[in-house]
Amino acid sequence: MAGIGTEALDSLNTLVFSSLEFLFRYLPLFLLILFLIPKKTRCLWLLAYSLLLYWAGEPWYVFLLLGMGAVNFLFGLSLDRRRSAPAEEEGETGEGPSRRSAWEAQPEGDWKELFPAALGEDDRRRKALFVLAVSCNLVLLAWFKLNNAFDRSFLLPVGLSFYTFKNLSYLCDVYRGTILPERSLIRFGAYLCMFPQIVSGPIMRYTEAFRGLLFEHGLSLYRLESGVKRIAAGLAAKVLIADRLGILWNDLQTIGFESISTPLAWLGAAGYSLQLYFDFWGYSMIAVGIGEIIGLPVIRNFHHPYAARSVSEFYRRWHITLGSFFRDYVYIPLGGNRKGMARTVCNLLFVWLLTGLWHGNSVNFLLWGLLLGLIIAAERLVLRPFLEGHRLLSHLYVLAVMPLTWMVFAIPSLSEMGVYFLRLFPLAGQPGTVNPGDFLKELRLFWPALLAGAVFCIPAAGRWCERHKNGILVTAALFFLFWLSVYQMANAVNNPFMYANF
Amino acid sequence: MKLLKRCPLTVLLAVSAFLLTVTAYANRDGIYGEYRNGQTPALAMLFEGAKDGVFPWSREPGDALLTMADAAVGEDPGDGAGAGAENAAPSPDDGEGPVPEDGGETGETDRAAEPKEEQAEPEESVSPEDAAASEGEEGPSEAQEEGPVQAEGEDPGAVPEGQEPEAPEEGGVPWTEEARDENATYEYVPVDESYLDDALFIGDSRTQGLFEYGGLEDHATFYCKTSLTIYDLFKNQQAFIRTESGNQTLEQALSARQFGKIYLMLGINEMGTGTPESFFTEYAKAVLKIRELQPNAILFVQGIMHVAAKKNASDPIFNNFNIDVRNVEIQTLEDKRDIFYLDVNEVVCDENGNLFDGWTFDQIHLKGKYYQIWKDFLLQHGIVREQG
């Protein structure tokens, strides 16, 4: 899965959506009981079930998750802005109208605007508390990431990067006063730990999750059907396209980068770009689908990124919840683009360096983040007018540049990365052991997945499916694709060599 | 009904999942017995079975499985006959009718014959009697079996059309004669690539790799397929050889064209199924069959290439110990006259016998550029037999 490759996911069938156990045992059981129990107990059920699933896979780290949840819950309460305005405190029960209006406030904005220069005693206390709370989360994340960087056998707790970011966004929002702190530990726990989002997001904001977690309205059959459709589509994207293309990338590594032909190197880069997208998009779609059934809002984590016309637009359409996190809680507070060009460029580079580090802690991720920061800065400074003026060229530019940046993302070893780029751009000529027929051989094996991937990168294809999603054609197709995915999964489970039939 | 209208996909999936689960449960001791495992949801068995051609309506338990269960167990006579036909290996026992453990006995005969030859090996000159005796054990029994079977048509799997032109002339008799005349053994000599002009390579994806990256495509012929196993090498369904006139089985291809050298490397895919014994039984049968179809070829049986250290340490099945158990058996087929054993592990493994770490990504296959090493090893180990 994108960005969380260093976590101990292999043993976690309880949380992996694309496992038969999850699809045919854990998820149906959860939903069945959810539909049967009274509204008031649903949130508790969600929390308990999520913890149970997490515990089944990570018996020890569930305590870390619980601990971080409790600590941040308390921090949230003590950061409550109303403490400095006692008059309001009594009147609020937590779910009243003022709370509603509070979420509708925009979370964006400069902290300094919210808290002008003259800080009272209380504000200073809150500020100190906020810094402490954020540091707690960051230190923990950094500690695990550093340990993993120096000892690859030290695995990160599943979902740590994701739930830490949920905690941080919650703390920031409470501190800014855009939301009121949650007073129910169960509801906050459910927000943080809910199994559809714990492994790899989306990083849903508390403002978005809150309404759903109240479970005020009954569960609807319409949402159930829509959610199941999302799950089926996401599963097909992940299993039939991404996992299949994973074999192509594996083939390239098996051959060894020094022995692949230049056409195959490009095919590999394209295949990897699609693989990453359908893997993560499919996964997000399943998460959103489950959320939709539960009653959470449908949030969009991907929005046809490969149809973007610049790299910066690409990242406004790719892993949107992560991008908006960095935008709202790092980039804009740093001054965003309002402090002059030099500062803007610095901010961009800083944010992208952090993004790189968040994805992984080997050198290539730093390089990847830096590279994207530079490309996006260059677009802002120079390229933008050109890209806006040339429709076709801007699309080609994105389709050519993105696979190259993904290669930096994909190849941890710098020397291997160098070899790969020399195969993409064979300036040094061709080494001796290249099999010129390799491109056609791999294309013959993988063209269906590549073609399907390419088609579903086109926004019109997605829009068509969305529009006809209740039609018989799409329903039948999803039914077929679901069982086809299950067929693939069943035969991959007992075959430990999904990637290697010798 | 209203439910179906409002959430058709949910209902369809739930109902179909339920039906599939019930079907799987109902047949869990029958056709899906082989797929039972307590962990995955029951309906997974249906999908795993479907991949092997086993469906709820299939009659025989696992009838399409290519396990050795058919050949080795074969409790009822009907099953035994079926296995004989399927394997199409005219083993000495086939003539005796549907004997249950035909496979097992072939193996024993072979191995009974082998030690004699091996003992004789160190001495350069084998006494003619010895050779005749050891050959005699195989030769006559084959001749016996070939004659009657073809005449009476008892063995339905033996493809008489393909063999008839060759078998009487070049088959059993000339070969044994040649062996009797030239009972000398041979030593390896370095050769160049043209040596491989009349060579055939048979193997799995590793041999496929040698084809793609060894630079031999202008010289040798390759009949290989990813995940090819010794069990399905001669299966009629396995028409894995692409020719201009369509796909051919190995038997058809070997009947159509004679080769001077045949290199065989198979055995890693088989490690998950069966035992070293059942593997060797099939391996010996296959070698015998190739020998019979290609009487003049020098046969190189290659030891299975090792895996790298990480895999070796972590995999309970695909490790070098298990590979070596099989390699020792493969080596017993060597007679240094027309069957030679080659072990490429000599040049691709470190001092612990693990495939060099940097030479492989997946711990199993050589990276492209290292196939050269394998090729060079083969070229260092040519056998030149002057026609006498």
Image (spheres, rainbow, N blue to C red):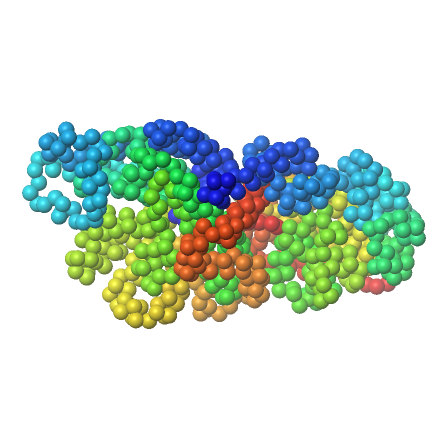
x then y, percent, for residue B59: 73, 40
Q: Residue at x 29, y 68 (%)?
A: A388
Q: Is residue A173 above or below residue B188?
A: above
Out of A87 and B126, give the one closest to the viewer. Answer: A87
Q: Is residue A495 above or below residue A242?
A: above
Q: How many marks?
A: 0
Observer able to see residue B193: yes
Q: Residue at x 44, y 67 (%)?
A: A425
Q: Residue at x 67, y 43 (%)?
A: B54
Q: Quadrant of residue B186?
A: bottom right
Query: On the picture, is B168 further left or further right than B338?
Result: right
Query: On the picture, is A174 further left or further right than A471?
Result: left
Out of A273 and A284, give the one closest to the viewer. Answer: A284
x then y, percent, for residue B365: 58, 52
x then y, percent, for residue B114: 81, 44
Q: Residue at x 13, y 48 (%)?
A: A113
Q: Quadrant of the C terminus of chain B?
A: bottom right
Out of B297 and A46, give the one closest to the viewer. Answer: A46
Out of B239 and A214, give the one closest to the viewer. Answer: A214
x then y, percent, for residue B93: 86, 43
Outermost residue toward the front? B2
Q: Is residue A445 above or below residue A286?
A: below
Q: Quadrant of residue A212?
A: top left
Observer able to see residue B358: no
Q: Quadrant of residue A309?
A: bottom left
Query: On the picture, is A203 further left or further right than B144?
Result: left
Q: Is residue A384 above or below residue A169?
A: below
Query: On the picture, is B7 further left or further right than B105?
Result: left
